Amino acid sequence: MPTRTDRAAGIIDKVIDTVAPPSRSSRSRPGSRPTRRARASSRGSRRAAAPLPVRGCLFAGIVGACLLVAAVIIGSLLLDRVTSRMAAEAFPTPTRTPNSAALGAGPVLGPPSITPDRIRAVLESYNSPAADEAQAFYDLGVARGIDPAYCLAFFIMESGAGTRGVARTTYSVGNIRARPGEPSFEGYRQYASWREGIADWYRLIDELYVEEWGLTTVDAIVPIYAPPSDNNDPDAYIRTVKRLVAGWRGL
């Protein structure tokens, strides 16, 4: 027969079973109370899970180190690029000076020494509004027996290939002075289009300078075409025209 002590112990056991959370073994066996070994195992599992934050910190540290190395590499590449650009600007690579002496006096008569595509490329490099007339520079020059390279060089000398001065309004490739009764703008011949201005330059050189005056070279044409009395430097003009043509010819 159970004693009072046994009944008290039974009551205490029921209270413990009600309050204490069941262990894995107690969930498998309903109504059983966790043993000392089960409680020890539970505490051991909690102790085994403790290193997880440490592993997380280690992973974060590795990722941070990789990001730092990548930042250093990218920064060094950018610095190298900026340094190279600064050095190139400070010490530009010298370009070969065209041998303009090979042109002699610069005879303007002759076959074309420049192609329509090259004419267009040169005009586009100056942002010229006449770039679409590259074929006209070529065809009209060939028709007159004048190398188109010289017309292009005069155009650049006179107005930066149509990007400055009155040429932007007159469509004149050579800033030709107007005669009485001719359409004009500020004393210069006014044309309806770039093609018309190109054709008139070739006509002027062919019919007046070559046929009438017998002047067939740059050296002979420029002092009259661009005289000092019109605020020109004929020698500098001649040097620049020859340098341009020699450069396009690869001399």
Image (spheres, helix red, strand yellow):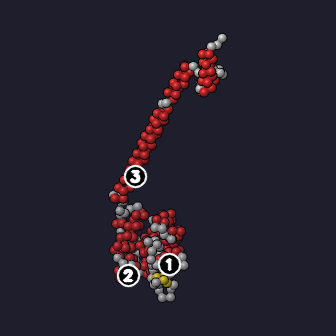
**Of 64 and 97, the residue lying toward us:** 64
Q: Which residue is mark 3?
A: 81
Residue 33 found in image quarter: top right
Q: Nearer the viewer, mark 1 or mark 2?
A: 1
Image quadrant holding the N terminus, namely top right
Q: How many marks?
A: 3
Whole-angstrom CA distance, mark 1 to mark 2, is 20 Å
Q: Are marks 2 and 3 in contact (CB under 8 Å)?
A: no
User: Which secondary structure, mark 3?
Assistant: helix
Q: How packed is label 2: few (under 14 Cα within 10 Å), some, or many (20 or more)?
A: few
User: In the image as oriented, which residue stretches furthest toward the top?
Assistant: 1
- Left or right placement of residue 227 versus residue 62 in this view: left
Amino acid carrying label 2: it is Asp
The picture places residue 220, in percent across and down from the top left corner, at 37, 76
* Quadrant in which the C terminus is drawn: bottom left
Q: Which mark is residue 230?
A: 2
Q: Amino acid at mark 3?
A: Arg
Gap between marks 3 and 1, in whole Å? Answer: 44 Å
Residue at 61 percent across and 24 percent down: it is 15
Q: Residue at x 45, y 74 (%)?
A: 164
Amino acid at the residue labelled 1: Thr
Q: Name the residue beneath numbered marker 1.
A: 169
- Please give left or right for residue 131 compared with residue 216 in the image: right
Residue at 51 percent of width and 84 percent of height: 183
Task: Give whichever of discs 3 and 1 has the lower sequence position.
Answer: 3
- Mark 1 or mark 2: whose residue is earlier in sequence: 1
Earlier along the polypeptide chain: callout 2 or callout 3? 3
Residue in front for this viewpoint, 30 or 212:
30
Locate residue 16, reporting x and y percent: 60, 24
Q: Quadrant of residue 177?
A: bottom left
Q: Secondary structure at mark 2?
A: helix
